[in-house]
Image (cartoon, helix red, strand yellow):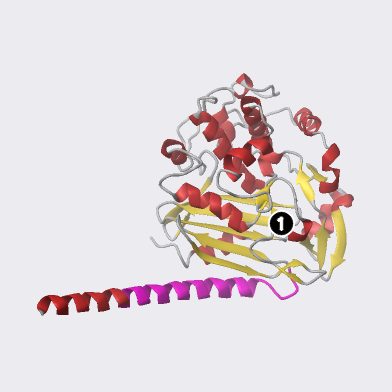
Amino acid sequence: MKLIITLCILVVVISCSVVQGEKEGMQMDDKAISVLSNLVDDNEPGIQYIVVNKNATILDHNVGLSNIEKGSLLNSSHTMAAFSMTKALTAIAVLQLVELNKINLNDSVSDYIEHPYNPHISIRQLLSHTSGIANPIPLKWVHLSKEHGSFDEASALTKVLNENPDLDAQPGTEYSYSNIGYWLLGKVIEQVSGKTYSDYVTENIIEVLGLTSNEIGFLIVNKNNHAKGYLKKWSFMNLFGRFFIDGNLLGEYEGSWLHIKNVYLNGPSFGGAIGSATAFSKILQDLLSEQSKLLGEKSKQLLYSQQQTNAGKNIDMTLGWHIGKLNGVTYYFKEGGGAGFHSEMRIYPDNGLASVIMTNKTSFNSRKILNELDANYVEN
């Protein structure tokens, strides 16, 4: 009888704990949804936000519009330009080739491809942004999607290298962000794999996870499922950015928002991925799992290993991710922004969580907003 009573008490305690956990989870979700709702009016560009652990989606919520002119609501399947979030895919691709002994992180980049910089710049330094290669603002390193069939990437890269042949710092001496560096990594991947960068990533990352070209890739395969990108009418970029960007990229005003036409970046490896927040979350889920389909455990740890300068000074970079802290918890992130879109994805390995936020408007403080949203789920 005592055993039966004890078991009954255990069942009640466990049931109460489960109910309490579910209630707390709902409260966290409600807080996040409230924050998102307050960020967007009914007639504005939208936001995709998703939080996952290794096994499941914790919250997947969307607000705002994918198309202001048509009044179309943004949903989880809509794709957006991810821009520099692509660099995380490039880093994974390089580490995959390291696992196959086709690349050594400490090898000179010049062992694989030609470039005008210091011949001793290493693969590791490109990944960690310590190569010293300059980072001119790449506002004009884009072309309209309708022009992609005739676009010559090799000529575009040669032009950029010829216009920016000097280093801003000696290799390995300091952190210095560089889109050119990751463009060169794309060329290394191509040289080693014998495939185009986009084909390599598609075959070895996207398809390995069971994702389709409708969810993530390097082309807009369904215009009806691709959110339109926007720029606020009364904004610094709209008022003065016209002096720096090609006027052919600008569409029509839709209410108080200027539509930016669909573009592709000239260098896909530094910012060419196009996908939904849900698709990017699948990549993060794989990295959270014990048995990643993308990387072995040793390579996965390199994504979380803080890098140093030649002098041994720590920098807030790993081999592919920036390093941040929220509520005392270390996270690794990659932000992306450009013509009509802004995004950021994070992974919290110690908490077994990851998040992605994507929006179809250029100006967006993803760091601040993700801090507020993720704080509902991240505990020290």
Relative horizontal placement of residue 133, taking residue 17 as reference (left or right): right
The residue at 66%/61% (across/down) is: 77
* Image vertical order of residue 195 relative to residue 305, above or below: above
**For this rendering, which residue is in front, 343 or 8?**
8
- Say which quadrant the C terminus sits in: bottom left
Magenta-tinted stretch? 16-44
**For this rendering, which residue is in front, 235 or 281?**
281
The residue at 51%/29% (across/down) is: 98
Query: Judging from the image, what secondary structure is the residue with disc 1 in?
Result: strand
Relative horizontal placement of residue 225, taking residue 29 as reference (left or right): right
In the rendered image, residue 241, in percent from the top left (x then y), is placed at: 81, 53
In the rendered image, residue 307, in percent from the top left (x then y), is placed at: 48, 37
Is residue 197 rendered magenta in the image?
A: no
Is residue 32 rendered magenta in the image?
A: yes
Q: Which residue is mark 1?
A: 341
- Residue farthest to the left? 2
Residue 196: quarter of image? top right
